[in-house]
Image: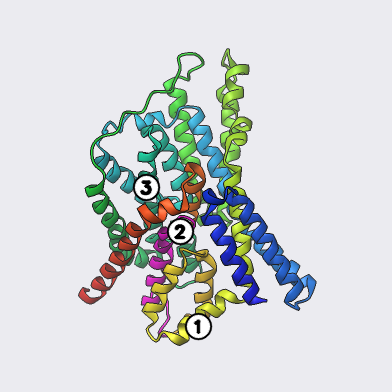
Amino acid sequence: MEIAIVILFVIGYLFIALEHNIKVNKSATAMILGAVLWTIYMVCSGEPKESVNSELIRHLGDISAILFFLMGAMTIVELIDRHNGFEIVTKRITSTKKVTLLWVIGFITFFLSSILDNLTSTIVMVSLLRKLIPEREDRLFFAGIVVIAANSGGAWTPIGDVTTTMLWSGGQISAANIIKQLFLPSVVSLAIPLTVLSFILKGHFAPAKNNETNENSLTKTQQVAMLTIGVAALISVPIFKTYTHLPPFMGMILGLGILWGLTELLHIFNHNRDNEFNDRSIVHALAHIDMSSILFFLGILLAVASLEVSGILETAAGWLEHHIANQDVVIVFIGIISSIVDNVPLVAAVQGMYPIVEPFQMDAQIWELLAYCAGTGGSMLIIGSAAGVAAMGMERINFFWYVKKISWLALLGYFAGIAVYFAQLAIF
């Protein structure tokens, strides 16, 4: 059974990677793959049917939390965009030099991801790129850097990436220590790709056209209000989680509900309410978010969950532990593997392998390195992280284009950050 699941997962993965060649949407492949792998597990595992169904429902609960979070974030960003809120930001970024904008976008994403999370930051920044860079070919390089920056920025804070949050809530790391130990390696993992791309990208890009029309245009006050309220709704999510201990999607739902009500009130006194509000309502925004990406998430996370519940990921982690003597090398490999399968079950497997006792107590080296590797390793493939999948869906990034143009940059940054981490240990 395990061999069949692995073979089908690899075949499905290849179909997703070859989406543009075989002309089959990756979302369809992912949904078929998720359903088929769970069917095989149900039929062949020998486990009681009630037990398998319970496992499926448990995993579906975790997946649904991600999907509702994603839908809420995408809707908030779409609402801000439809009220021309991003123009407040884009009008202040006046440089058309590619290299300058590359560094600006990279570090805005890096720090935004540290206080939000890599998924939300990617959605916001790719939406901004559409306003700043009209040419898609130019924009793809920037989208690739956004993925690297979002994952690097999420690795050094306890709320920036789901795996770091797992280690924080599990007692493996403390907030102050992980910020101190991983900030510099995370900066380097972004700075190296930016430096290399600075020698590749040349010249300037054409300024983006102003899409705002005089008819039915909003006042600047309304634009600022929508941008401020929308960003506040996004930033409040990690704060909501910290104080209520509820999952992040609950904070996102609350923020979206508040924004929905305020949007209604914003247009109450408009004379052209019927025409203008219909185009800028949340119902219209919901109709324009990328549902195919959400369904892709559903399918691929169900497929990965089948690898976890069947014990394949735990077996792989155990094999690494027994065949590679150096634990640091094992963690580095796990980071690389996280570019292929979801980093959440990989981190969960490592948490289960090592109890929090000597020498694996809180803030031990293994947990710090795992937080960095699991957080940044997903940048090496476009489907290796939530940030990558979101960018892939929003900009229709080709899998092999990313491998050819961005993966090697992410790999350089990944190992440069690891080198800086061990240099810190040696010096301090």
Q: Is residue 156 left or right of residue 419?
A: right
**Disc 2 designates what residue?**
161
**Disc 1 designates what residue?**
319
Q: Quadrant of the C terminus?
A: bottom left
Looking at the image, which residue is at 36% across and 32% down? Answer: 90
Mark-to-mark CA distance, 2 and 1: 26 Å
Does the rendering let one see residue 391? yes
**Disc 3 designates what residue?**
109
> Would you say the magenta stretch is mainly helix, strand or loop?
helix
Query: Magenta stretch?
Result: 358-383
Q: Amino acid at mark 2?
A: Asp
Earlier sequence position, callout 3 versus callout 1: 3
Looking at the image, which residue is at 50% across and 83% down? Answer: 319
Earlier sequence position, callout 2 versus callout 3: 3
Residue 107 drawn above or below residue 264: below
Earlier sequence position, callout 2 versus callout 1: 2
Is mark 2 in CB contact (under 8 Å) with mark 1? no
Q: Looking at this view, is 97 or 24 the one in front?
A: 24
